[in-house]
């Protein structure tokens, strides 16, 4: 996989994943919405680790300037 995410994009995704995890495990957001946020946070965390977003690829979007 070719990298298509900048470090700024990756940091934002990690922060959002942490926020979603806090909201779910802190009991602020529960039920179906809480689970959706938790899954979305997991996807954000995974894509930030590998620096590749599969949704960027079909649209030829890249925030990586390397």
Image (cartoon, rainbow, N blue to C red):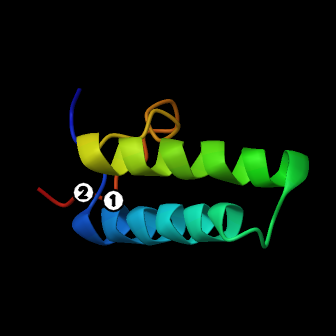
| Crowd class of label 2 (few under 14; some 14 to 19; many from 20; radius 10 Å) | some
Outermost residue toward the left in this view: 66
The answer to which of 59 and 44 lies nearer the viewer is: 44
Q: Secondary structure at mark 1?
A: loop
Name which residue lies at 63% across and 42% down: 39
Whether residue 4 is visible: no
Q: Is 29 located above or below residue 54 in the figure?
A: below
Q: Measuring from the top left, give residue 53's x and y in whole percent.
A: 42, 41
Q: Is 43 located above or below residue 1 in the figure?
A: below
Kindly identify which residue carries mark 2.
Answer: 64
Q: Is 43 located above or below residue 54 in the figure?
A: below
**Quadrant of the rendered structure where residue 46 is?**
top left
Which mark is on residue 36?
none
The answer to which of 60 and 26 lies nearer the viewer is: 26
Name which residue lies at 44% across and 62% down: 13
Q: Measuring from the top left, give residue 3's x and y in whole percent.
A: 22, 41
Kindly identify which residue carries mark 1.
Answer: 63
Q: Measuring from the top left, give residue 7's x and y in whole percent.
A: 24, 66
Q: Is residue 47 left or right of residue 20?
A: left
Name which residue lies at 81% across and 65% down: 29
**Quadrant of the rendered structure where residue 24 is?**
bottom right
Q: Are marks 1 and 2 in contact (CB under 8 Å)?
A: yes
**Quadrant of the rendered structure where residue 23 is?**
bottom right
Q: Secondary structure at mark 2?
A: loop
Q: CA distance from mark 1 to mark 2?
A: 4 Å
| Crowd class of label 1 (few under 14; some 14 to 19; many from 20; radius 10 Å) | some
Q: Is residue 54 left or right of residue 1?
A: right
Which quadrant would the N terminus be assigned to in this image?
Answer: top left
Name which residue lies at 40% across and 63% down: 14
Which quadrant would the C terminus be assigned to in this image?
Answer: bottom left
Whether residue 56 is visible: yes
The answer to which of 25 and 17 lies nearer the viewer is: 25
């Amino acid at each position: 996989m070719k990298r298509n995410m900048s470090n700024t994009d990756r940091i934002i995704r990690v922060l959002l994943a942490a926020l979603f995890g806090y909201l779910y495990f802190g009991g602020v957001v529960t039920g179906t919405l809480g689970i959706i946020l938790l899954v979305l946070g997991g996807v954000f965390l995974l894509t930030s680790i590998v620096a590749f977003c599969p949704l960027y690829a079909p649209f030829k979007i890249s925030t990586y300037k390397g």
